[in-house]
Amino acid sequence: MDQKPRRDFLKKAALALPIVAVTDSADANAADDATEGSAESTPSWQGRMTAPDDGKRYGWFVDTRRCFGCHACEVSCKSENDVPLGNYIRQTTYLDKGKYPEVARLFLPMSCQHCEDAPCIKACPCGALHKESGGTVAIDYDVCCGHGSCVDACPYGAIYMDPVASQAVKCHNCYHRVESGMEPACVPTCPAEALHFGDLNDPQSRVSQAMQRAEDEDVELVQIRVEKETKPRMWFAGPAAAEIEKKLPREGESFSPEAYDIYNWKEGEK
């Protein structure tokens, strides 16, 4: 792929930090005006919303019944993508339910949903957010201006602003691994085999087979915040998705260390 891996970009950005130019409000407003001015014709984001015609349709299946909150997916993700402390590309949210001695703890691993109708792509004024192979929503770090409107637009809180490069960061399905025939770093790291990724158009792919097994067991597959009409490509099995949805970040928010505060584990608290 023509875009540079984020790891390489951050190395260059760190060296050039004293002279990195930051887009000021005037530039940002000009970009907004340009976007609004073209609204009557073809939207500027239309081409970026279309994935390459390679016959693939990447998606996720998360079996929350198997997840036991070990955070291995988060650790591998941070290591693979140089995610700094206090920031997350993926995060597992806890929820304690019931009263002693009848108690339970639910876990919900979350990341970008790689929406078919991605609001972050529409909101991006500089054209950095786009669709890659299989519909992966990715960021071109040679183009991203650090406007931050994608953070405001994401209904899942899956994007954060990098404190060094002043650019948006999110899950990109580890495209640098996928194009080499490997899975995203979090998938093989999960000891419970709760995470499944692959081509939804291929009935023999691991994700398709895992979803089929769940359906054969009459397990309902659900998605989160479908009312946002973004057509997310992540499905969940188990009660955690419905129970924990209210605790997840929303537009203008990002995954936060506060999610691990013990006082936020209690049902009904955020």
Image (tube, helix red, strand yellow):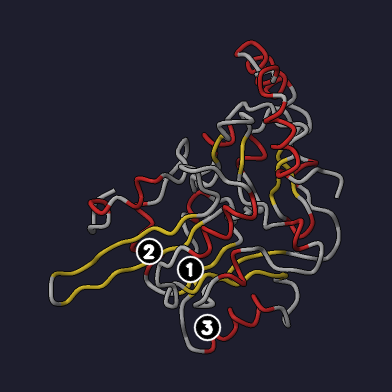
Please name the residue that numbered disc 1 is placed on.
Answer: 222
Q: Earlier in the sequence, mark 2 or mark 1?
A: 1
Please name the residue that numbered disc 2 is placed on.
Answer: 242
Q: Secondary structure at mark 1?
A: strand
Crowd class of label 2 (few under 14; some 14 to 19; many from 20; radius 10 Å): some
Please name the residue that numbered disc 3 is placed on.
Answer: 214
Crowd class of label 1 (few under 14; some 14 to 19; many from 20; radius 10 Å): some
Crowd class of label 3 (few under 14; some 14 to 19; many from 20; radius 10 Å): some
Q: Position of residue 7 (x, y in %)?
A: 71, 44
Q: Hey, which quadrant is residue 144 in on the image?
A: top right
Distance, label 2 to label 1, CA atoms, is: 8 Å
Going by the numbered disc 2, the residue's amino acid type is Ala
Contact between labelled residues 1 and 2, with CB atoms less than 8 Å apart: yes
Distance, label 3 to label 2, CA atoms, is: 17 Å
In the drawing, what numbered circle is on residue 246? none
Vertical placement of residue 123 versus 237, above or below: above
Q: Secondary structure at mark 3?
A: helix
Q: Residue at x 38, y 64 (%)?
A: 242
